[in-house]
Image (cartoon, rainbow, N blue to C red):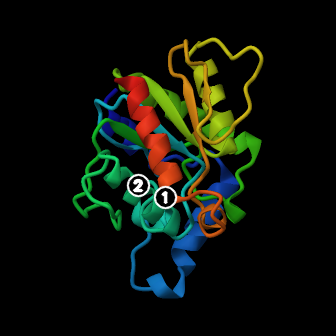
Amino acid sequence: MSLEAIADENARCRRCPRLVEWREEVARVKRASFAQDTYWGRPVPGFGDPDARILLFGLAPAAHGANRTGRVFTGDRSGDFMFASLHRTGFASQPTSVHAGDGLTLTDMWIAAAVRCAPPANKPTPAERDNCLGWSVREVRELANLELIVCLGSFAWDAALRLRAALDLAPPRPRQRFGHDVLALADSPLPLLGCFHPSQQNTFTGKLTAPMMDAVFEHGRSLVQ
């Protein structure tokens, strides 16, 4: 099945009742600053270069970001910080990601969230995470050149380990914990590279700076060359 067909099927998923109720309520009520926008209000599929060697793996769509725009990491502060870095490091054609038709293209990277629907308080449950695993598995199986997963935060790191297991790839022994710019499973297919999530909690406090994020993406490029 093509990536386009997977995306179309993914966008119609209603498997998690709590997430369906929340994403649709947010899309109906809206934030005042986006009152004139038509919200996407559905699961948000992966996006990027079908020939990508790097998967950038996040947590979940933001309620008024990707849940509004329909494209992962698009229309919120986390995405603003991240796409600026992707542009500086040569993975994105422009430094901003405003809406799905803004002309942004990615080179050598596919971006997806471990959980495809916006969760209340940005906290999916373990069951919701596991319900979404199949969408990531199906996308990865179509990304024939994929060599590396860059994980944005510990939730994505744990989800990526589950993704590898679902792809019948050997688990790490011992299990390696998430860390910023930490590389795990370097000698295995689809190694993991950690990066602090570009949430405002991290970027406003200086836990994650622009040079730190740039360095992780440059490290990722060096690993697939």
Q: Is residue 185 left or right of residue 67?
A: right
Residue 210: image tag: 1
Residue 108: image tag: none
- Is 78 rendered above or below residue 147? below
The image position of residue 210, as x and y in percent, is 48, 58
Quadrant that contains the N terminus: top left
Asked where in the image residue 70 lies, by quadrant, the reply is: bottom left
- Is 107 rendered above or below residue 69? above
Asked where in the image residue 166 lies, by quadrant, the reply is: top right
The image position of residue 127, as x and y in percent, is 74, 40
Residue at 75% across / 22% down in the picture?
A: 175
Whether residue 180 is visible to the viewer of this picture, yes or no, is yes
Q: Tag 2's secondary structure?
A: helix
Amino acid at the residue labelled 2: Ser
Residue at 70% across / 51% down in the picture?
A: 124
Q: CA distance from mark 1 to mark 2?
A: 7 Å
Q: Nearer the viewer, residue 15 or 43?
A: 43
The image position of residue 169, as x and y in percent, is 59, 13
Q: Nearer the viewer, residue 154 or 217?
A: 217
* Residue carrying label 2: 85
Asked where in the image residue 173 lies, by quadrant, the reply is: top right
Instruction: Indicate which disc, 1 or 2, sits on the residue closer to the N terminus.
Output: 2
Quadrant that contains the C terminus: top left
Are the two marked residues, 1 and 2, in contact with CB atoms closer than 8 angstroms? yes
